[in-house]
Amino acid sequence: MSPRNSHSPGRRSFVVAAAAAGLPLFLPSRLFGATAPSNRIRVGQIGCGRIAQVHDMPGVLESGLADIVGVCDVDSKRGADGRTLVEKFYQTKQVKAPPPVSVHRSYKELLARSDVDAVVISVPDHWHAEIILAAVRAGKDVYVQKPFTMTHEEGVLVRDEVQKSGRIVQIGSQQRSMEQFRRAAELVRAGRIGAVQRVEIGLPVDPTQPDPPSEPVPANLDYEAWLGCTPRAPYTEQRVHPQKDYSRPGWLRNEAYCLGMITGWGSHHYDSLHWALDCEDGGPSQVEGRGEFPANKVWNVHGAYDLLLSYPGGVQVSVSNKHPNGLKFIGKEGWIWVTREGQATSSDPKNPGPPLPPLDASKKKLLSPKGLKVQLPRSTAHHTNWLEAVRSRKPPIAPAAVAHRSNSACIVSWISMKLGRPLTWDAKAERFVNDAEANGMLSRSERAPYGAVHHARKTWPAKG
């Protein structure tokens, strides 16, 4: 619901409620009062690459609830393109007196602005944790692309910091804002297929290619900042992102910056799995995986893989590139299938396979809404849901604590694939049982002065 059609709480009632909950009161006063519904949330965009251009910035602008007033990117060309996209949107919509859009090279400059209420983080995975941490400590609400964090250690750190801060943090698990995934979760939870016995999850794979020679760093790219907490490595365009267009970036295929499709697409489907199984605060107990890892130094994320995870209630979850892209819940009374519209993916846009039904079942009557007693939270636009939560101070549909758990299951799967042997996971303690080697892979070293763990040791004053 748009703020223009809702009744926002007065500032006094919010202060009383927030104080009772022990939450910091960082929401700008201009968002309250009699004229509050006409006030728009001022957003800063951090990272202006492919996903920001086609998904995040349009999602915020088209919500009608917010203005993007600043953009940030370590690549000055992309920063300029980000500002152009926002300005063209205002021109197309014939917005009178649109706010000026500033361009920044450092995310810290954007977070230091007292007139920015919230930020969208659309950067490579290895940068997520540090910027989320810095943003919530600066008193900003956050929308961040999935996966939540690169490592499990980062996830615990950031989840706990978000909880303490009281900030609104939404993860880009937009399948929660797609009707078919919500309906599938409701139907499974309601017992339409009986007790769930098995779930099959299909994810794509990334191809590799030979390592290219090193190249000069483009003058428009702050490569040192782009590398961040990761080890120094020779620059190649294949490692970072294209300089001529916004096609799929190479960093998605390098384990220093991304774990591959197991978190890239896996964070979506594991989240839908947890939603349907009603285990959003839990995870698997056992995992056994195999994966193919190329010897290349640049495009070295996993290829083909097979995983088997054990979840509470004896549910066996098979995750493999051999399954079609989506989730199939199998129970004693039949099965329910769910996926996105069509078959093509951003990693494989020329997929020759036929389109798959977004929602299907072994018997059509299993999909009937009649008598359905389970009703999960509804959202039809993921960025809008976040912005509404910023106003209401109620949890968004994909909050940080939930995202950490689904991402943890992805990371646990990746560790099993790397080690190639069965592992026992204690979801409550969030540690592997009697396995020092596996537990050592829950974190990684950081190159100073970058990294979430490094910055967590600092005391950052809250701003708002």
Image (spheres, rainbow, N blue to C red):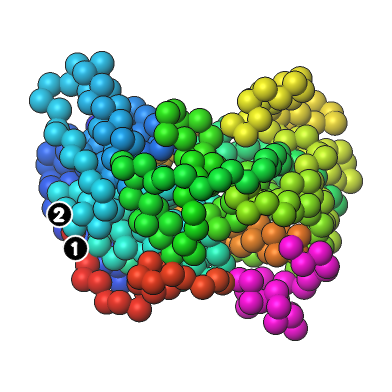
Near-viewer residue (358 or 221): 221
Q: Residue at x 25, y 72 (%)?
A: 460
Near-viewer residue (377 or 311): 311
Where residue 415 appears, as percent x and y from the top left, is: 70, 64
Tally of numbered discs: 2
- Disc 2 residue type (three-letter): Ser
Q: Residue at x 60, y 50 (%)?
A: 298
In the image, is residue 462 above or below residue 400? below
Which dot marks residue 215? none
Q: In the rendered image, is residue 435 in sight? A: yes
Asked if the stretch drawn in magenta spans residue 421, the answer is: yes
Q: CA distance from mark 1 to mark 2?
A: 7 Å
Residues packed near mark 1 inside 10 Å, few (<14), some (14 to 19) or many (20 plus): some
First-in-chain label (1 vs 2): 2
SS at circle 2: loop
Q: Which residues are magenta?
A: 418-442
Q: Residue at x 31, y 59 (%)?
A: 135
Residue receiving disc 1: 463
User: Taking 210 as reference, is 57 left or right?
Assistant: left
- Disc 1 residue type (three-letter): Lys
Q: Quadrant of residue 431?
A: bottom right
Q: Find the residue positioned furthest to the right.
A: 332
In the image, is residue 443 above or below residue 136? below
Quadrant position of the N terminus in the picture: top left
Q: Residue at x 44, y 28 (%)?
A: 245
Near-viewer residue (276 or 303): 303
SS at circle 1: loop
Verify CB contact (< 8 Å) between mark 1 and mark 2: yes
Residue receiving disc 2: 114
